[in-house]
Image: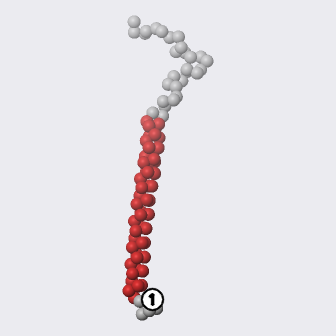
């Protein structure tokens, strides 16, 4: 028994190894979940910005197609046809 290969010692080493593996897995899982939550929030904010842009895609366009035309037929019209 003086050689150091007793079954009790192997059992203690095996239990310590399993506890270490389990603790490492749990710690790594918690770190991964925290990273994914942060990345998910960033993706959500980016998606909200894109959705806000998509609400009115014509916001930056002109509504009068003749505004940049050299011949705008509606430029000086100030007559009310109903009076």
Give the residue at the far bottom of this rendering.
Answer: 1
Quarter of the image that includes the N terminus: bottom left
- Residue toward you, 5 or 52: 5
- Residue toward you, 66 or 54: 54
Q: Position of residue 32 (x, y in %)?
A: 44, 59
Q: Who's the residue at 41% across and 53% down the image?
A: 37
- Residue toward you, 49 or 63: 49
Mark 1 element type: loop
Give above or below for 21 relative to 13.
above
Q: Who's the residue at 47% across and 41% down the image?
A: 50
Residue 83 found in image quarter:
top left
Residue 56 found in image quarter:
top left
User: Label 1: few (<14), some or many (≥20) within 10 Å?
Assistant: few
Residue 22 found in image quarter:
bottom left
Q: Who's the residue at 42% across and 72% down the image?
A: 20
Give above or below for 6 relative to 29.
below
Give the residue at the far top of this rendering.
Answer: 83
Q: Position of residue 34 (x, y in %)?
A: 42, 55
Q: Who's the residue at 55% across and 20% down the image?
A: 67
Q: How many marks?
A: 1
Q: Is residue 3 left or right of residue 8?
A: right
Q: Position of residue 38 (x, y in %)?
A: 44, 51
- Residue toward you, 54 or 33: 33
The residue at which mark 1 appears reads as 4
């Amino acid at each position: 028994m003086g050689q150091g290969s007793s079954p009790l010692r192997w059992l203690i080493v095996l239990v310590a190894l399993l506890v270490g593996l389990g603790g490492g897995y749990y710690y790594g899982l918690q770190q991964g979940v925290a990273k994914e939550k942060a990345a998910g929030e960033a993706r959500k904010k980016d998606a909200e910005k894109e959705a806000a842009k998509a609400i009115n895609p014509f916001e930056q366009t002109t509504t009068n197609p003749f505004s940049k035309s050299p011949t705008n037929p509606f430029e000086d019209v100030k007559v009310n046809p109903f009076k």
